[in-house]
Image: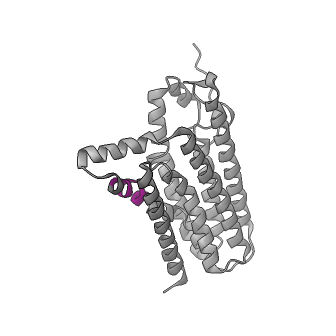
Amino acid sequence: MPDFIVVLAVNAGVILALFVLAWAICWAIRDVTPVDSLWGLGMGLVAVSTYLQTGGGTPRRLALTVICVAWALRLGGYMLWRWRDHGPDGRYVRMLDKAKAERGWGYGYAAFRLVFMMQMPMLWLVCLPVQLGQIAAQPAKLGALGLIGAGLAIFGLVFETLADGQLVRFRKDPANAGQVMDKGLWRYTRHPNYFGDACVWFGLWLLAAETTLGLFAIVGPAFLLFTLTRWSGVPTVEGRMRRRKPGYEEYIRRTSGFFPWPPKPPVAS
C-alpha cells in the first residue's frame, strides 16, 4: 500500500477519534457549539500526525506543520472563547430542535448525524495540503513557490487575526449596538476573516505544490473557498445580517464581498 494512503487513512482515524470524543462531551452538555473549534484544532492535529508519520526533518514539513498549528491554535482558541462568551450557537439549536420535532431524532443521534458526521470528511479534505505536502522528502529545500506560499499563509493568518480582533472590540462597545462593522479591515472587505482563511490554505497549498503529490492537494483549498463564498460562509452570514441590520444593504453596495478593495463612494442624495 502506498505510503500516502497509509498516512491519509491514519489521519482519517485521528479525526474520527477526535470527533467521537467531542461528540460524547457535547451530547453530555447538550451543546454542540464547541464543534466549531475542532475545525481549527483538528487540522492542527492532522498536521502534527502527518509530521510524525513521515519522520519530519525537512524545511517543508516543518513549515507546513508550524504554520498550520499556529493557525489551528488561533482559530480553535478564538472559537472556544466565543462559545464561552456568547453561549450556544442559535443555528445548531434550531437545527437540532427541528430534527427532534420533525423526525423524532434524539439529541445524540441528531448531533452526530447533522453536525459531526458532516464536518469530519470536510476537515480531512480541506487540510490535504498539510498531508500530501509532507509525504515526499524531496525537494528538501523550499523553492520560490514554497517561500511565496509561506508568506501568503502568514499574511492570511495575521490578516484574519486582526479582523477578528477588530470585530470583537467593535461588538464590546455598547455604542455600536445595531450598527454595521465597517471599520478597519472590514472597510475594505465584508469578510476579512474568510479572506484570511483562504490565504492561509492557498499558501499552504503552494508550499505543498513543490512536491508532486502536493499539487493534487488543490482540491482542499478550492473546496474551502467554495464553502466560504458559496455555501455555509458568506451566504449564511449575509442572510442573517440583512435581516438584523438595516444598514447592511448599503454596506454591501459599497464594500467588496471578499477580496480587499477600497470602498465605493456614497451615493449622492
x and y percentages locating residue 266 in the rendered image? 61, 21
Pick the residue in front: 92 or 234.
92
Pick the residue in front: 104 or 131.
104
**Residue at the spot 44% in from the left edge and 28% down from the top edge:** 243
x and y percentages locating residue 106 in the rendered image? 30, 52
- Residue 217 inside the magenta-drawn segment: no
Pick the residue in front: 185 or 149.
185
Q: Main secondary structure of the magenta part?
A: helix
Q: Against 217, is 165 above or below? A: above
Residue that lies at the very extreme toward the left in this rendered image: 103
- Residue 182 seen from this side: no
x and y percentages locating residue 135 in the rendered image? 60, 77
Say how the picture is coloured.
one colour
Instruction: Name the quadrant containing residue 154.
Output: bottom right
**Residue at the spot 65% in from the left edge and 46% down from the top edge:** 160
Give the left or right position of residue 144, taking residue 43 as reference: right
**Residue at the spot 58% in from the left edge and 59% down from the top edge:** 41
Please count the marks in the image: 0
Instruction: Please report the bounds of the magenta region as a residue range.
Output: 110-119
Give the left or right position of residue 219, taking residue 28 as reference: right
**Residue at the spot 46% in from the left edge and 60% down from the top edge:** 122
Q: Against 63, is 179 above or below? A: above
Residue that lies at the very extreme toward the bottom in this rendered image: 1
- Residue 253 seen from this side: yes
Residue that lies at the very extreme toward the top in this rendered image: 269
Instruction: Name the quadrant containing residue 63.
Output: bottom right
x and y percentages locating residue 59 in the rendered image? 74, 72
Q: Quadrant of the C terminus?
A: top right
